[in-house]
Image: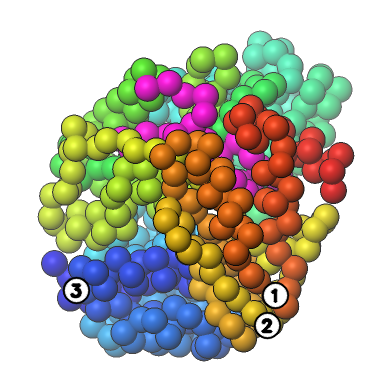
Amino acid sequence: MFEKILIANRGEIALRVIRAAREMGIKSVAVHSTADSDAMHVRMADEAICIGPPPGVDSYLSISSIISACEVTGAQAIHPGYGFLSENANFVQIVQDHDITFIGPTAEHIRIMGDKITAKETMKALGVPCVPGSEGGVPDYETAQKVAEEVGYPVIIKATAGGGGRGMKLAKSADELETAFRTARSEGKSVFGNDEVYIEKYLGAPRHIEVQVFGDGKGKAVHLGERDCSLQRRHQKVFEEAPGPSITPELRDKIGKTCADAVARINYIGAGTIEFLYENGEFFFIEMNTRLQVEHPVTEAIFGVDLVREQIRVAGGLSMSFGQDDLDLHGHAIEVRINAEKLPNFSPCPGKITAFHAPGGLGVRMDSALYNGYSIPPYYDSLIGKLIVHGRDRPEALARLKRALGELIVDGIDTTLPLFHALLDEPDIQTGDYDIHWLEHWLETNL
Ligand code: ADP
């Protein structure tokens, strides 16, 4: 096993990895920008090294600085967390060229899944059901018209390199197609450097259901059930739960097996998430994320496993510590994402934390890098914490979430916490009756 690993990330996810490493007796190296000298991950790691100025491109995305930090500290492996370089195949290749282990999938798998067209083609060939749409890329507007007619309106135009909810445009009817097609292309080009787009049937009221998979890289893989991440704002998740309120044990076993078999066949290594839209009892693949997800703790809660520990194990050449038969689902877990944002516009709200108190008690987990007096820098993602609760069933988890939210104090800045207080009073949230559009509609009338 590794003696020392470097975490190429910041914030709560850096803490998450440091914690797993420490429990395994592995030393951790934090990297940080000059804006993050006082950050919690720097304080908590065994060693810390400054890798550049505040902007992400000059620090957390600087491949050469991160490789140098590994060389200087003697770290044998890199955990990328999520975001930043976690799904950058080029980075993975460079890491390996320096005889450093990347804690995650192979560059090839990241490349395949990072391009949504190739990802869909691969998944389709592996027997995973996909959203109906174009066969591969749509090169011009004339083809787009033809495909959209065949698929049937409404359609969604997606940039193959898109992510984070960007590079996606809806065309409700033929007269909206040209604008949607051209803006998806130009957004793909300007944000992701790739103007290739494809077309999908736009589903009216689906739920976002994603399946957690884990492979050993040698043809063995398991699934750890699903998460329902339908509560989204601008295609970004804000509230996630596991198991999905609409998924029966039979459905879970079936889609779970399909996913586990698919990743086993490609010798996938480490954690991955296969995302679906789920409507009228049917699953439609949209994309695969080849990394640990923000919302992984809800899965950890119901299965009682440590996914980061498992990632480090398989990267270090050990076998997986569980097989499919060892995985029993217990109870219900919910996560809320706490962002430093001001309602109702969700505008970023960095600044100094004048008081912070994390909730506690049975079934409560708070993953956050906040502390009293900490100043949130303005350069990075606005996620400042995740509150995760686990209960014996969904009603207990909801009651626990309400109780824990009541204990949590984050003073000095605006956060998205009032949103969750309000959501918990909604009958649809209490019953689990929501789809991917529910939150947007609710925000329009309630904020
Ligand atoms: P990203 O990579 O940007 O996260 P995804 O393809 O995962 O993009 O889609 C993000 C979200 O956009 C989904 O969770 C869903 O809410 C919505 N979405 C994507 N594809 C469709 C579709 N075909 N029909 C309806 N909604 C969609």
The three-letter code of the residue at mark 1 reads: Asp
Residue pointed to by mark 3: 25
Badge 3, how many Cα within 10 Å: few under 14, some, many 20+?
few
Badge 1, how many Cα within 10 Å: few under 14, some, many 20+?
some
CB of residue at label 1: within 8 Å of ligand 1? no
**Of pointers 3 and 1, the one earlier in the residue sequence:** 3
Describe the element under mark 1 as helix, strand or loop.
Answer: strand
Can the viewer see residue 227? Answer: no
**Vertical placement of residue 198 versus 65, above or below:** above
Badge 2, how many Cα within 10 Å: few under 14, some, many 20+?
some
| Rendered image quadrant of residue 353 | bottom right
Q: Position of residue 89 (x, y in %)?
A: 39, 55
Question: In the depicted view, which residue is nearer to us: 117 or 168?
Answer: 168
Describe the element under mark 2 as helix, strand or loop.
Answer: loop
CB-based contact (under 8 Å), mark 1 and mark 2: yes
**Vertical placement of residue 329 versus 85, above or below:** above
Residue mark closest to the camera, 3 vs 2:
2
**Vertical placement of residue 339 versus 64, above or below:** above
User: In the picture provided, is 183 more to the left or to the right than 294?
Assistant: right
Residue located at (30% from left, 25% from top): 257
Residue pointed to by mark 1: 411
Magenta region's main secondary structure? strand
How far is disc 1 from disc 2 in space, using C-alphas?
5 Å
Residue pointed to by mark 2: 354
CB-based contact (under 8 Å), mark 3 and mark 2: no
Question: In the depicted view, which residue is nearer to us: 48 or 106?
Answer: 48
Magenta residues span: 223-249
Describe the element under mark 3 as helix, strand or loop.
Answer: loop
The three-letter code of the residue at mark 2 reads: Thr
